[in-house]
Image: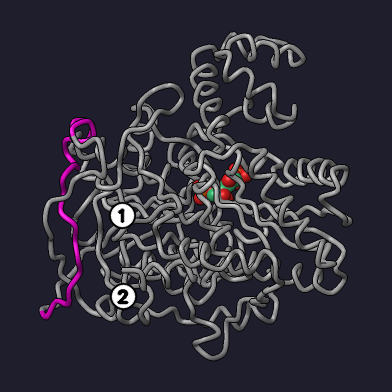
Amino acid sequence: MKKSALQKARASYQPKLPIVLTGPVKAVAGKPTQSVANQTEINELFPCTYGLPEIKFEKNTAPTAGKPVNVGVILSGGQAPGGHNVISGLFDGIKKIHRDSRLFGFIMGPGGLVDHKYIELTAPIINEYRNTGGFDIIGSGRTKLETKEQFDKGLEIIRELGINALVIIGGDDSNTNAAVLAEYYKANNTGVQVLGCPKTIDGDLKNDLIETSFGFDTATKVYSEMIGNIQRDCNSAKKYWHFIKLMGRSASHIALECALQTQPNICIISEEVEAKNLTLQQVVDQIAEVVAARAAEGNNFGTVLIPEGLIEFIPAVKALIAELNDLLAAKAEEFAAVAADKQREFIISNLSPENAATYESLPHGVARQLSLDRDPHGNVQVSLIETEKLLSEMVGKRLAAMKAEGNYKGKFSPLHHFFGYEGRCADPSNFDADYCYALGFNAACLINSGVTGYMSSVRNLVKPAVQWIAGGIPITMMMNMERRHGEMKPVIQKALVRLDGAPFKKFAAQRKDWAYNTCYVYPGPIQYFGPAEVCDQPSLTLQYEHKGK
Ligand code: FBP
């Protein structure tokens, strides 16, 4: 495989490990835990893995002789920078337990376990992928593991390969899978451990003990570089309004982090839109007001950041989606049999009058997207909805009305962007390279300590890597009950942007200035070599969250 000069130089980067993981460790158990909500239901559903204690690794003075372990690893869901380093950390960790340990990678996500598709990950393979972006070492997929048949099929290959532990690297839905699988294998006394690692660029898998999911840092740095470049361009030509949609599913963490890094004129935060019970038109009016005020100063240019999940947070649309989810689950067969040109009518006639009215008020393309297939976990595929175009079109109409009333004099030329896939496979920043390697290495320590149903946890992340704290948290601790495909299911609770959190407050305190004045910041590209203040800084979200504690 031909390599770029940067790839060659980056291959020799040695990720930093928390000091505690550099020698023998002992697992110190804390207090028993409970789920974030619905304790009774979650306890009943996870009788073998509920209430386990949090674990912290401490230095062990007496080195223990380890036995070889065979481990299976799965990359699950959307790509996130650093996945290859989780795998290399895991590889090095199990080799440290015993040099005869073996690592098997299941191909193309959880489906590889069920279909028995795997490769053995040997040192030469691992070495090719150290510090690189992407999930291409084994591929990823979104198959949901939920049936007994899938678990049993998985167990067949686990037995055949003599696998002791499975590590699932994924987001909230994939780690929910990991918890369900851990429970099943424990309840059936299989002796197979199942562990999770917190992955997702969306940044919505976090709590006090999982401070951030990996990939968020790199992806937001890539998007911020591009936003900065756009801002410099628009400040040079002064003739375009850029509507930039950012990936991140429901949560607005990515948009917020990029706003903190680049200081755009406008950044919409979905969680605030919901809290203030805003309609789409009110959001549009607010943007139009800023466009008009800037135009009055002769500034017919600007940037608007839009989280991709915005539409789901408009309260009326949220109610519509909830009813659509139930309707499409209950009448799946009937709906599938309806001809494409009659589906709109079918939906409208089956919805409550209020939701039918919301459905009809949306542009046809957006309404159609809301009624299309959910992903395997029941999520609306928000990345496919062109919210940036919808908003700029509505802002254009509003400005035309304001012009007619004599309240706007200016020129409005919008351009559209969607940043998502551009950042998911970037070479991990130093932060993600170190964090991921530590997460993988730490997962090996969890395997060695015999636990199951845990997520690898590395924290104290604003401090230098040597001071990071390593351990594990029971996945059931992060769960609550939510409605999916029309049924109540145990799932990991999504961490949305907190309006009382330090990152949002920091943004809210400055956004007026950013709107009317031009305060752009140009972060530039990720740097892998150079001074620590340029290369090793964690995300501003993480930094402000820590300061806010
Ligand atoms: P995960 O939750 O699996 O980490 O996915 C992240 C994400 O990039 C979302 O931001 C986005 O909405 C979605 O994946 C896109 O899905 P796909 O990769 O299937 O197009």
Q: Are marks 2 and 1 in contact (CB under 8 Å)?
A: no
Amino acid type at image mark 2 = Trp
Helix, strand or loop at mark 2: loop
Q: In terms of image quadrants, where is residue 483?
A: top left
What quarter of the picture does the C terminus occupy?
bottom left
**x and y, in percent, of residue 357 in the image:** 64, 19
- In the image, which is nearer the foreground, mark 2 or mark 1? 2
Q: Is residue 455 above or below residue 401?
A: below
Q: Is residue 147 above or below residue 113?
A: above
Task: Please name the residue that numbered disc 2 is placed on.
Answer: 468
* Residue 178, disc: none
- Residue found 23% across the figure and 49% down from its top: 452
Q: Is residue 109 above or below residue 365?
A: below
Residue 465 visible: yes
Task: Please name the residue that numbered disc 1 is placed on.
Answer: 455
Q: Is residue 539 magenta?
A: no
- Residue found 54% across the figure and 27% down from its top: 321
Helix, strand or loop at mark 1: strand
Q: Is residue 527 left or right of residue 173?
A: right
Q: CA distance from mark 2 to mark 1?
A: 16 Å
Compare residues 21 and 495 and report the one nearer the observer.
495
**Residue extent of the magenta highlight:** 40-61
- Residue found 70% across the figure and 28% down from its top: 362
Q: Is residue 70 left or right of residue 364?
A: left
